[in-house]
Image (cartoon, coloured by chain):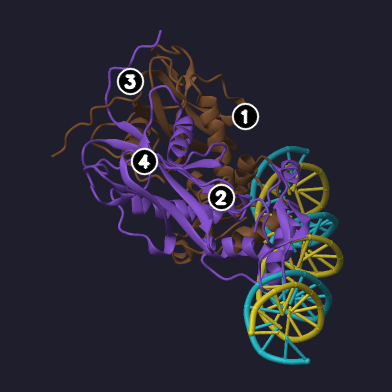
Chain colours: A purple, B brown, C cyan, D yellow
Amino acid sequence: MKEVLPVFNSAVSIDCVLFGFDNGELKILLIERNEEPFKDWWALPGNLVGENESVDQSASRILHELTGLSDIYMEQYFTFGEVDRHPQGRVITVAYYAMLRLGGDKALKPLTTYAKKAQWINVKELPKLGFDHQHIFDKGLEKIKRRIKHLPIAFELLPEKFTLTQVQNVYELILGKKLDKRNFRKKILSFGVLKELDEKQKGVSFRAATLYKFDKRKYAKLFGKEISF
Amino acid sequence: MKEVLPVFNSAVSIDCVLFGFDNGELKILLIERNEEPFKDWWALPGNLVGENESVDQSASRILHELTGLSDIYMEQYFTFGEVDRHPQGRVITVAYYAMLRLGGDKALKPLTTYAKKAQWINVKELPKLGFDHQHIFDKGLEKIKRRIKHLPIAFELLPEKFTLTQVQNVYELILGKKLDKRNFRKKILSFGVLKELDEKQKGVSFRAATLYKFDKRKYAKLFGKEISF
DNA sequence: ATATAGTGTGTATTTTTTACACTAAGTAAT
DNA sequence: ATTACTTAGTGTAAAAAATACACACTATAT
């Protein structure tokens, strides 16, 4: 039943902007390429879409291959289709972002056979990127700036238990500006998706903050209603 | 320099959701297919991306071929990449929407060689669509619902000169709900992108409304600032 | 005990959103 | 000319949301 259409107009790939929050810094995962084109350049992790997987499945597979993680909130945000974006031929790429929890329980295990190495790099200190990846990144950052105002994606960056100050840090890093502490706490709590725990921060040499966790149940109830910052 | 990559993983196409406003109704352009698969079904207009055009260029070309129009605000909103969405092979499709001015100066001239006919159809009376086009349409409608709250795309649907009531009609049709007249007018004028003309509606058998036009200059000044409904 | 560093809290003001109903103007019919 | 009809056009009060702003608390380290 399924005949291949008699056309070759482009290959299709996935590129991922994987955000992580570590040490008070917003980072993304980059690879250092080991092959032409752009050998020795930094680039976003990505790969070709397989013939028997949807683009969403492909994105999940690629994320898994790169990090060992599954079940991550990952979302398509734009498709880049300039003719000359890949020097070796026509490749249209579908871009996704994901927010990852770093340094937590189990470390990430990138299987980067096609790269010298993979590394988490502060978004404020990005190196020059190959292809049109700077552009893809810029557009991804812009996208999540909008989305964290409405969707609870920021919590994906944080450990299971976190303080309100940590949440505020994430918002400030992504939005690129300072927020007022009292107003921020009022607002973030008013969404009703956080649960206060009967537990405090440990190992700090000052007053310990209350821990919270993201409450998926409450979120499910609100889903559909717009929440916004 | 440019070698074709040795992969064939998918063909890439464009599908367009072309919105029009006519006779107080929100419509989209559909074609009736003349070839298998889905012969005799209605479908969104679309086509394969050419090898030497970007996806944006491709979308403009396809829009032009279908309507004779150029210089239309057209925007990519999602890429659909399910494996089995096309029964004859792997085709990933990039969806665009555009807002068109109907019934105005010059009529649209669809060159629909690959279809029996093209027709503007009320979005409230959509027929069964081929492929996953109902899904593509649904997602497109959802997208413009959000976007008309922030971007002045609704004016693209209206003639050059229009009344505030017409604008409100468009908003109500897209959002699918009634809006309060006074509040709507306050808000739409507060954006400062409309210019009141020294001219009234003609040919109506009741009090003639003041005409307005969209003022691109004023919009350019505001661009960057968020405007929202 | 005291210095330090981050936690946690309330109120007043401004802005935005919402709810709500009547008069004005033009046309058509008599 | 009067009347009926239909849409245009307008303001205000109340509620809700956003903003601006400063100090006392608490745990630890010395």
Q: CA distance from mark 4 to mark 3?
A: 48 Å
Looking at the rendered structure, the secondary structure element under dot 3 is loop
The label on residue B113 is 3
- Name the chain under label 2: A
Reply above or below: A172 against D22.
above
* Neighbours of disc 3 within 10 Å: few (<14), some (14-19), many (20+): few
What residue occupies the far left of the structure in this picture?
A: B1
Q: Quadrant of the N terminus of chain B?
A: top left
The residue pinned by badge 2 equals: A101
Residue A52 in the image, given as x and y percentages of width and height = 42, 22
Mark 1 belongs to which amino acid?
Lys
The label on residue A112 is 4
- Whether pointer 2 and pointer 3 mark residues with C-beta atoms closer than 8 Å, the reply is no
What residue occupies the far top of the structure in this picture?
A: A1
Q: CA distance from mark 2 to mark 1?
A: 44 Å
Q: Is residue A9 left or right of residue A120?
A: left
Looking at the rendered structure, the secondary structure element under dot 2 is loop
- Whether pointer 2 and pointer 1 mark residues with C-beta atoms closer than 8 Å, the reply is no
Q: CA distance from mark 4 to mark 2?
A: 19 Å
Q: CA distance from mark 3 to mark 1?
A: 27 Å
